[in-house]
C-alpha cells in the first residue's frame, strides 16, 4: 500500500505544534466499541461509523487496542501477524478507510504495538518449535533447557503476570519464556532480526498513515543477561520499588531511541506512548527523554486513591519527574486492564485496581465525575477510556462461564477481573445490545445499560456525557489549560485541593462533607449542582469546580 496522508491542514506537515502535549486521547477497545457487521463483536467498520461521535466529544486522537491477526488468547495482545487485520475486525482496506475518515474529521489515530511477545501462532514461533533445540530460528525467542535431572523444572523462578510459571515446556523438552500467557512467547530482543522486524512493522503502519503507537509492555522487552532468578520478591507488585530482571532494564532505551529516529522521519508529528509499569515516576521519565518516546502512561496517578494528600503528591511528583526531560505529564483514570474508576471510587478507599464489588454506585459516579474534571484541568495529556464518558461502572457480576480474560483461568490469586471493564458500550436506550450492534454482544450487558446509553444522555445537561463534552470543549477554549508543566497550589482546608493555572482555578472537595470557600471567580463547569452565595459558596462533597478568574 502506498503512503497517503489526506488529512486537513491541522494534521499535515511538521508544524511544530506538538499536538500531543495537551491532547485528549480516547481509547477504543475495538471488540467492545461498535459492531458494524452484526456478529456480536466490535470491529473497524463499527469504529469508523462512530467517528463523528468522537469528533463531537472533542477528543484529539483515538488509540485503538490491537486489531491484528490473532488467535485472541489475550484479546488480541497475542499477535500472529503484525501487518494483517484479524478477520473478526475487518481488513486492511477497512483500516485504511478508518484512518482516512478519522483524518478528515480532524482526529488522529494511534495503534497498539505489541513488541514484547507474539502469539504462539506467529510464523516465527511455529518455525522455532518445528526446528528444534539449537536451531538459530529458536534464538528469536527465549528457549532454554530445564533444570533438574531430566530438565523437568523451569529454567528459572519467574512467574507469569497472569499466574503460574513464566515458562512452558515445548514437546521436545526445552522451555520457552512467556511473561504473560503461554500463548504469548516473549521475543528475544538481543536478536537483531527482532529489532529489524519491528522497525519494519513501525514503517508499515506509519506508511498506512497512523499518527502514533501505544507501546505494549514497553518496560519488558529486554531481560537481564543470564535470566537470573528473582529469589524471594513479590514480583506481582509491579509498582513496588524493586527492579526486576525482566522489567525496566536499561537496554530498552536504545530500542526507543532507534524508533524515535523513524518516527521523526515522517511528517505530521507521529508519536509513541509507553505502557511502562515502573517502580517510580522518575523511572517512567527515562522513557520520554527527548530522543525517546513522547509520552508514558501515568499508572501512579491511575492507582491513587480518592484522597487529597495522595492525589496532590502524585500530581506534584509526576510534574516534577517530567519537567527535567521536557515531556508532558499524562493522566489516566481507566483503561481495559483495570476496574473502571466509577467502581473503584464506589468502594471503600477506592484502593486496588481490580475489584469485584459494585460498591456505592451513586458515590462512585459522583467521585468519578469530580476526578475527571480534576484530570482534565491538569497540564499535559489525558487519556479517556471508552464508556467512562457515560459514567459506566465495571460489570462486577459477570458469570464465570462468559469470562474470557486469560488471567481468570490461570492460577488463583491473580486479578482475572478485566472482563468487567470490557463489556460492550451502550449507544441506544433500546434495541439489540443497546445499539452496540444488530447481533447481540460478546459479553452480556446489564439491564441498566440502556439508561446509560449515548442516546439517553445526549442533550441531558446533567448527564456525564454532556459533562465530558463541555469539559473537553472548555479545556480547548481556555488557552493553556492542558499546556505548561506546573500548577500553583492555593491555600485550602485539609481535604480540599485548589490550584491555579493562568486565568483559571480548580477546586476539588475530597473531605466527604460540604466545605464553605471564598468564591474564586466565575464558574465554568461543576461536576455536581452548586449554589453560590455572596462572595462565598458551599463546595459539595466529592465535587470539582472550574473557575475563570
Ligand atoms: C498490556 C495490555 C494487556 C495485555 C498485556 C499483555 O498490559 O494492556 O491488556 O494483557 O499487556 O500483552
Image: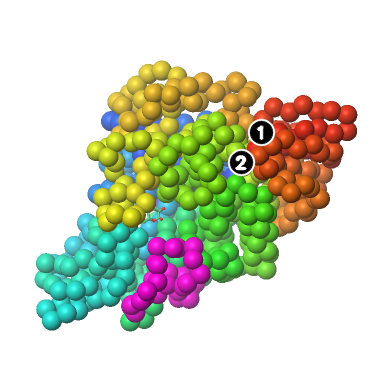
Q: Magenta segment: does it hold 236?
A: yes
Q: Quadrant of the C terminus?
A: top right
Residue wearing tag 1? 527
Instruction: Name the residue at 44% across, 63% down.
Output: 237
Mark 2 closeness class: few <14, some 14–19, many ≥20 residues within 10 Å? many
**Magenta highlight: main SS:** loop
Residue at left offset 30%, top offset 59%: 163
Residue drawn where x is 67% and y is 68% of the image = 324
Where residue 38 appears, x then y in whole percent?
A: 30, 27
**Does residue 388 appear in the picture of this structure?**
no
Where residue 513 sits in the image (x, y, percent)? 69, 37
Q: Is residue 268 magenta?
A: no
On residue 372, which mark appears?
2
Residue 444's x, y, as percent? Answer: 33, 31
Q: Are marks 1 and 2 in contact (CB under 8 Å)?
A: yes
Above or below residue 127? Residue 498 is above
**Looking at the picture, does residue 50 appear above or below residue 123?**
above
Q: CA distance from mark 1 to mark 2?
A: 9 Å
Ligand 1, by image quadrant, is: bottom left
- Judge whether 341 appears above or below 14 on screen: above
- Camera-nearest residue between 146 and 140: 146
Q: What span is colored magenta in the figure?
A: 227-253
Q: Is residue 521 left or right of residue 225?
A: right
Kind of element beneath mark 1: loop
Amino acid at each position: 500500500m502506498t503512503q497517503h496522508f489526506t488529512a486537513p491542514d491541522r494534521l499535515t506537515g511538521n508544524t511544530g505544534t506538538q499536538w500531543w502535549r495537551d491532547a485528549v486521547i480516547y481509547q477504543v477497545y475495538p471488540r467492545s466499541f461498535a459492531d458494524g457487521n452484526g456478529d456480536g463483536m466490535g470491529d473497524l467498520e463499527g469504529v469508523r461509523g462512530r467517528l463523528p461521535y468522537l469528533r463531537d466529544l472533542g477528543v484529539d486522537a483515538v488509540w485503538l487496542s490491537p486489531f491484528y491477526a490473532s488467535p485472541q488468547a489475550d484479546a488480541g495482545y497475542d499477535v500472529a501477524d503484525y501487518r494483517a487485520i484479524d478477520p473478526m475486525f475487518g481488513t486492511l482496506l477497512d483500516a485504511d478507510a478508518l484512518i482516512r475518515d478519522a483524518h478528515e474529521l480532524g482526529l488522529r489515530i494511534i495503534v497498539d504495538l505489541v513488541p514484547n511477545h507474539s502469539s504462539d501462532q506467529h510464523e516465527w514461533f511455529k518455525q522455532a518449535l518445528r526446528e528444534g533445540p539449537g536451531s538459530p530460528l529458536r534464538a528469536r525467542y527465549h528457549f532454554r533447557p530445564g533444570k533438574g535431572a531430566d530438565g523437568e523444572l523451569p529454567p528459572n523462578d519467574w512467574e507469569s503476570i497472569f499466574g503460574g510459571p513464566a515458562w512452558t515446556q515445548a514437546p521436545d523438552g526445552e522451555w520457552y519464556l512467556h511473561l504473560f500467557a503461554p500463548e504469548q512467547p516473549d521475543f528475544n530482543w538481543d536478536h537483531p532480526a527482532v529489532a529489524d522486524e519491528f522497525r519494519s512493522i513501525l514503517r508499515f503502519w506509519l506508511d498506512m498513515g497512523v499518527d502514533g503507537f501505544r507501546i505494549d509492555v514497553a518496560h519488558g522487552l529486554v531481560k537481564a543477561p543470564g535470566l537470573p532468578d528473582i529469589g524471594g520478591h513479590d514480583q506481582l507488585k509491579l509498582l513496588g520499588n524493586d527492579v526486576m530482571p525482566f522489567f525496566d532494564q536499561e537496554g530498552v532505551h536504545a530500542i526507543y531511541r532507534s524508533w524515535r529516529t523513524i518516527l521523526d522521519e515522517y511528517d505530521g508529528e507521529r508519536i509513541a506512548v509507553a505502557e511502562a509499569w515502573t517502580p517510580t515516576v522518575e523511572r517512567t521519565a527515562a522513557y520520554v527523554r527527548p530522543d525517546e518516546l513522547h509520552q508514558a502512561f501515568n499508572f501512579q496517578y491511575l492507582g491513587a486513591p480518592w484522597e487529597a494528600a495522595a492525589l496532590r503528591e502524585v500530581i506534584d511528583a509526576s510534574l516534577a519527574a517530567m519537567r527535567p526531560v521536557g515531556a508532558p505529564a499524562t493522566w489516566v483514570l481507566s483503561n481495559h486492564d483495570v476496574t473502571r474508576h466509577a467502581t473503584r471510587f464506589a468502594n471503600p478507599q477506592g484502593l486496588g485496581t481490580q475489584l469485584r464489588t459494585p460498591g456505592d454506585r451513586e458515590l462512585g459516579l459522583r467521585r468519578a465525575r469530580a476526578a475527571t474534571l480534576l484530570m482534565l484541568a491538569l497540564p499535559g495529556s489525558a487519556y479517556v477510556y471508552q464508556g467512562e464518558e457515560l459514567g459506566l461502572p465495571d460489570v462486577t457480576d459477570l458469570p464465570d462461564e462468559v469470562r474470557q480474560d486469560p488471567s481468570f483461568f490461570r492460577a488463583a490469586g491473580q486479578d482475572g477481573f478485566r472482563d468487567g471493564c470490557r463489556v460492550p458500550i451502550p449507544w441506544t436506550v433500546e434495541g439489540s445490545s443497546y445499539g452496540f450492534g444488530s447481533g447481540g454482544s460478546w459479553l452480556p450487558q446489564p439491564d441498566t445499560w440502556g439508561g446509560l446509553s449515548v442516546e439517553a444522555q445526549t442533550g441531558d445537561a446533567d448527564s456525564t456525557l454532556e459533562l465530558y463534552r463541555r469539559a473537553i470543549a472548555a479545556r480547548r477554549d481556555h488557552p493553556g489549560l492542558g499546556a505548561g508543566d506546573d500548577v500553583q497550589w492555593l491555600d485550602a482546608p485539609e481535604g480540599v485541593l485548589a490550584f491555579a493555572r493562568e486565568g483559571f482555578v480548580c477546586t476539588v472537595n475530597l473531605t466527604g462533607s460540604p466545605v464553605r470557600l471564598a468564591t474564586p471567580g466565575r464558574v465554568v463547569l461543576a461536576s455536581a449542582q452548586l449554589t453560590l452565595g455572596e462572595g462565598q459558596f458551599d463546595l459539595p462533597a466529592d465535587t470539582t469546580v472550574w473557575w475563570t478568574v
